[in-house]
Amino acid sequence: MTITIAAPAHRIVALAPSITELVFAAGAGANLIGVPRFSDFPVAAKLIAPIGDASRIDLERVLSLRPDLVVAWKTGNHAADFERLEQLGFTVFVAEPATLPAIPRLLRAIGALAGKDAAAEKSAVEFERGIAALTAQYRNRAPVRVFYEIWHAPMMTVSGGHLISDVITLCGGRNVFSAAPVLTPIVSLESVMAAQPHVVLGGSSATTPEAFVAPWLRDKRYAGLRNVRALFVDPDYIQRQTPRVLQGARIVCEHLEQVRSGRANR
């Protein structure tokens, strides 16, 4: 999405916690005047005025803040909310980094809109260098079949169009539901077994590695899951589309190496 503004944005409202984090990473955190609930990173975000939930924005509160830029989350916010803000004359930038290269592009875009080009460029380059290093390290590794769980009940995963799938591919993994027709499909345990993953990754419906692994240990009673490992990934590092995905990618790559090592030693 391309937008233009007459002057750098000094009053920014973010409509999702991931957007809040991106604005801070682009060097424009001091320009934020409104953020949604669960905007908890960095710590300074907790001190900014709340404007509702990402899925239920308090439009009256946003209007009262008189922002000169609103940054929305394409698939997380209700389109009617940011479209209404546009109709009322506010400048709205709709963001959705669906791939790893999209994150530094978005950092640069936010930096340009806020007049923070240098800070945004620094963050973008740091992210790109980290991803390039992982790519060089893992591009030729033996493939590992991955089921990524973003929720357990109902069981939900990601298709090949999701940023998480991009991370799996970066690490030499193969998302077993990459061909799913929707971004975050609900799947059955039977379909997971039929997909024959080597490992289950995730963590959103659990707060500790032990809590994430527990139901999959119980499911080892099924022959199709007997040799499948379950490994925890902090959702803040991979399910938020921000520069912290680099940390998540490092964890995913390390997990897949554990799986490769375990298979090689059998």
Image (cartoon, rainbow, N blue to C red):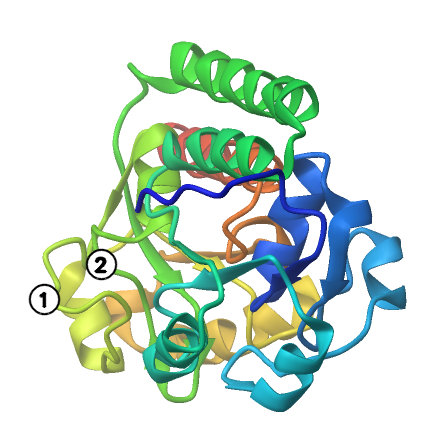
For the question of whether residue 251 can be seen, the reply is: yes
Closer to us: 134 or 111: 111
Mark 1 secondary-structure assignment = loop
Q: Amino acid at mark 1?
A: Pro
Quarter of the image holding residue 81?
bottom left
> Residue at coordinates 70% horizontally, 81% vertically from top-left?
64
Which residue is denoted by mark 2 in the rendering?
159
- In the rendered image, residue 82, in percent from the top left (x then y), is placed at 42, 74
> Going by the image, does 6 lie left or right of 101?
right
Q: Nearer the viewer, residue 211 or 246?
A: 246
Residue at image point 50% right, 19% down: 128
* Crowdedness near tag 2: few (<14), some (14–19) or many (≥20) residues, C-alpha within 10 Å: many
Quarter of the picture holding the C terminus = top left
Q: Residue at x 50, y 35 (%)?
A: 258
Which residue is denoted by mark 1 in the rendering?
A: 181
Direction from residue 144 to residue 56 in the image, left or right = right
Q: Residue 75: image x %, image y %? A: 35, 68
Q: Under tag 2, what secondary structure? A: loop
The x and y percentages for residue 99 are: 33, 40
